[in-house]
Image (tube, helix red, strand yellow):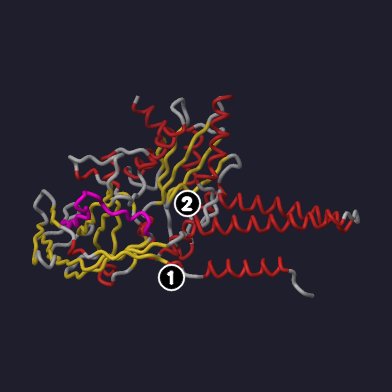
Amino acid sequence: MSLSKLEVSLIALALLSLAVLLVPSNKVAFQLELDPASFPARLVSDQNGVANVSWVDEEQRIWRCESDRAFGSAFCSYILILENNEFQGIDLSKFSRISLQADYVGNGDSLRIYLRNRHPAYFREDNEISTKYNLIEIPVSFLLKGEMIEMESFVVADWWLDNQKLALEQSQPEFGDVIFLEIQSGSFREAGSDQIKLNRIHLEGNYINDELLYRVLSLLWVGVIFGFLVIRFFQLKRKAKVSFEYQQELRSIHKILNLKNKQFEDLAKKDPLTGALNRVGMRDYFQRALQEWHEKRRPFSLIFFDLDHFKRINDNFGHDVGDTALTSVTELIDFQLPQHCALARWGGEEFLIACMGMRASESEKLAQQLCVTLARTPFKGDLRVTASFGVAELNERGLSQLIKKADDAVYQAKANGRNQVCCRETAELETV
């Protein structure tokens, strides 16, 4: 049986889609190479004199950090100034990976890397610390080998967020105008001397990111499937036969069309890793909950939770184990939820549970149960995961304030020692 031109075209498109998905993203990446020696640099140390920083060879950009005793909060920093003569930083937002290669002699296990971003929403000319501190702490071996670091692994430093008091939507990493690259001594450095020289900065970005690629392919296939079904529909209509066989085929076509549209709509609303709702998927739930609250005063509360020390899992066991942990936690939490609650991955290791029809006191009890269940449940490889929970209830101040209150409660739970629940409403009542 010979194939029609349409069928041949579909096969060719399927093979092309498969080839696009199988091509490694770094094979079609654009790159940027930065020479540290071409930018001004300065050295900074803590104000307490515990750590001292100095140039070994300023021309060669070799610097040393010395301390006669172990310390945790004190630090030495090498700051590379990326602004050009027109006071413009470098837009790194289009890059997905960064590699820093350096020579290192010392007894430290890790170093902190800051990509400090400037934005009018929070930056002030008279306060250099107002640049957003996008942070990652990496093993020294990463710098020695120049290994690639995913830009999505950066987080905004907690101490900076506490100091700035930004809204939730401004608390995510940003790289649109990076004016400083800072290398800082790692956490809990031992006494001794470290000598460092930054040799190379290399960045890579994909011409098309995975999310956009999947959306384009999804839309392409929706269009192709829709077009194919429409063509088939009119072919059947032109034949004007009313036999049962043709009627059944027409019904099947309509069913497939509706099913495919529903599948692609669901894909756009779910997190591809965990299968939980994403922010887009939560939009309809939020709208329904707000409408119920305004019209019937039906209670609505939120539970935010953030996995404790999740970065250690990625650093110690690898990102594959971290991804598995995120998926396992999602399945465990989702299984425990009442039917009227909805679970969403809010970003990174942070999740949100929307509880329609529940007051803060009820959501707090649910959060306590989830906190205990999570802490007692071993995952693959006997991995243990805990989380800090924050609870808040909707009031006249609206959804944005509800999200902020729940997020603040998470930070309070972490400050109180993690692996616990903090209810914003309870805390306010106790203060009163």
Which part of the image, by quadrant, shows the N terminus? bottom right
**Residue 206: quarter of image:** bottom left
Q: Position of residue 311 (x, y in %)?
A: 36, 57
Which part of the image, by quadrant, shows the C terminus? top left
The foreground one among 210 and 333 is 210
The foreground one among 416 and 83 is 83
Look at mark 2 in the image and give the residue it sits on: 374
Q: Nearer the viewer, mark 2 or mark 1?
A: 1
Q: Position of residue 38 (x, y in %)?
A: 18, 62
Tell me the residue at 40%/36% (across/down): 404
Magenta span: chief secondary structure: loop
Q: Amino acid at mark 2?
A: Leu
Q: Secondary structure at mark 1?
A: helix
Look at mark 1 in the image and give the residue it sits on: 27
Q: Position of residue 364 (x, y in %)?
A: 47, 37
Image: magenta residue range: 76-95
The foreground one among 327 and 126 is 126
Tell me the residue at 53%/40% (across/down): 283
